[in-house]
Image (tube, helix red, strand yellow):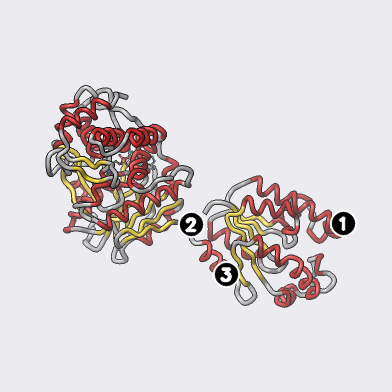
Amino acid sequence: MTGTIFLIGLSGSGKSTVGPMLAERLGRGFVDTDDEVERAMGHTVAHIFATKGELGFRSLERAALARIAARGGDLVIAVGGGAVLAASNQEILRAFAARTVWLRASPDVLAARLGDGADRPLLADGPLAALERLDAERRDIYDKLADMTVDVDMISPDEVVDEVLAALGDGLIRVPVLSYTVLVGRGATERVGELLPTSARRAALVTQKTVPWRVDLPIETARFDIGDGEEAKSLATVERLCRGFAEAGLTRTDVVVSVGGGVVSDVAGFAASVYHRGVAVVHVPTTLLAQVDAAIGGKTGVNLPEGKNLVGTFWQPAGVCCDTAALDLLPEEELRSGRGEMVKYAFIGVPDLAGLPIEEQVARCVALKASVVADDERESGRRMILNYGHTLAHALEAAQFHQPDRVRLRHGEAVAVGLVFASRLARLLGRIGEARVREHVELVAAAGLPTGLPAALAPQPKRLVELMRRDKKATAGLTFVLDGAEGVEPVYDVPEGAVFAALAEMEAS
Ligand SMILES: NC(=O)c1ccc[n+]([C@@H]2O[C@H](COP(=O)([O-])OP(=O)(O)OC[C@H]3O[C@@H](n4cnc5c(N)ncnc54)[C@H](O)[C@@H]3O)[C@@H](O)[C@H]2O)c1
């Protein structure tokens, strides 16, 4: 969770005890506004009250809170009991709080805790009466400001921390897919242990040297690096991995963990599905494309010289961990590629992603893929809509695959071109109007993705049509997933002439 956690409540309610404990458990810093005032003035709060009076202290306290808030960072801040009276402090809490937690205590319990109230200037005239007065004066304000309230009378500081943590949750989104969970959010990697099967004593962690994301597993781990790019998606890599698994003593109750983009999850998933006739796999996708697509849904695969993804299996993972912090390290061109798949989702059921936090965007795409996959695990029907834009995309990728000097169009970029092409083809077949084509072009362009054919392939429509004819989904003639009045659906036996005409409309980019 990002943003500040403010602790509010009367003097003695435990803010300065619970605050550092909570901060430590959350791995963040802790600041107490009273300490900040004391540090700035070089005197105790009691001394400041004695020399400057309550008004003088409150003004220093306001300045202290403003300073702390301006410094930023995800902190736990214990707010002085009376600070909430100032409207400017209330504004700060409202503006900066991820959560404001009221530690609610009864005056009599507090009075017993605080004894004679020494060092607490506001209690000098008799703690119980003073606390009752302060409670009456402030409880409505605490109540209004607080997102959550913990009654602290009967529980220890440890229990207060547990209760706050339980209520805060871990800030992660959990999307159920078939029988497993996809964890989405910043810091999800810390929770990856939760996804491992309980039977696993050893893990084979499959990654690439080019993946800058580290995952520490709570079990013995052997690391395997595979090569980068489509060349690494080969049966040779799978054989090397399986032999490595055997050498490392991986048994059928152990687990393979993939850490990387779609290349890693496709290869590691495939190796896991065939090693010992199938061992559990957990994916930690670290590219946007793998988080919203490749690591979800259980399709694995490798390439043959004859084509991309020609050998593969359906092998559902035991869990998937999409840590959006990994995306901070991703180069812009890889992010753009991921956005290609996200644009596809916009046309098959997830509109309005713009403006949402990235965690939410990823989670929504995952949830849609989850629902489609749950309906059709082995891609015999509805799941084909996930291939929207992919028939041409695969042809472009295959054409590049065979070209030594290929223009490296990334998967999501190829999908983006494929989406525009599919919309043009759908219009030529009378399934959609020109406005809908424009929507495709605009959304693809807005994501910074290409809307035309790569210059090297634009002059080769025959070759592209030939490759599209060989598409795995093409069980009957030329098959495409196309938009229409009923939404996106597979369309069989599309006339070749329309396909050439749609290709001709695709300007080279
Ligand atoms: N199985 C499926 O359902 C499915 C769906 C879509 C795509 N795919 C496959 O996925 C592959 C493409 O996946 P991709 O786009 O993730 O490419 P990729 O796996 O090649 O990753 C792209 C590059 O980014 C690096 N990388 C990974 N994480 C990084 C990070 N956090 N920071 C910096 N660099 C990082 C990788 O090492 C690699 O060099 C294709 O082979 C495609 O066929 C599979």
Going by the image, does 238 lie left or right of 90? left
Please, what is the three-letter code of the amino acid marked with disc 3? Asp
Label 3 near label 1: C-beta < 8 Å?
no
- The residue wearing badge 2 is 171
* Residue 41 visible in the picture: yes
Residue 429 position within the rendered picture, expressed as x and y whole percent measured from the top left: 23, 35
Q: Please tell me whether mark 2 sits on a helix, a strand or a loop.
A: loop
Residue 213 position within the rendered picture, expressed as x and y whole percent measured from the top left: 39, 46
Please, what is the three-letter code of the amino acid marked with disc 2? Gly
Please, what is the three-letter code of the amino acid marked with disc 1? Thr
Judging depth in this view, the residue of 10 and 148 nearest the camera is 148
Numbered mark located on residue 158 in the image: 3
Numbered mark located on residue 51 in the image: 1
Q: Does label 2 or label 3 sit earlier along the sequence?
A: 3
Q: Is 390 drawn above or below residue 195 in the view shown?
A: above
* Residue 225 visible in the picture: no
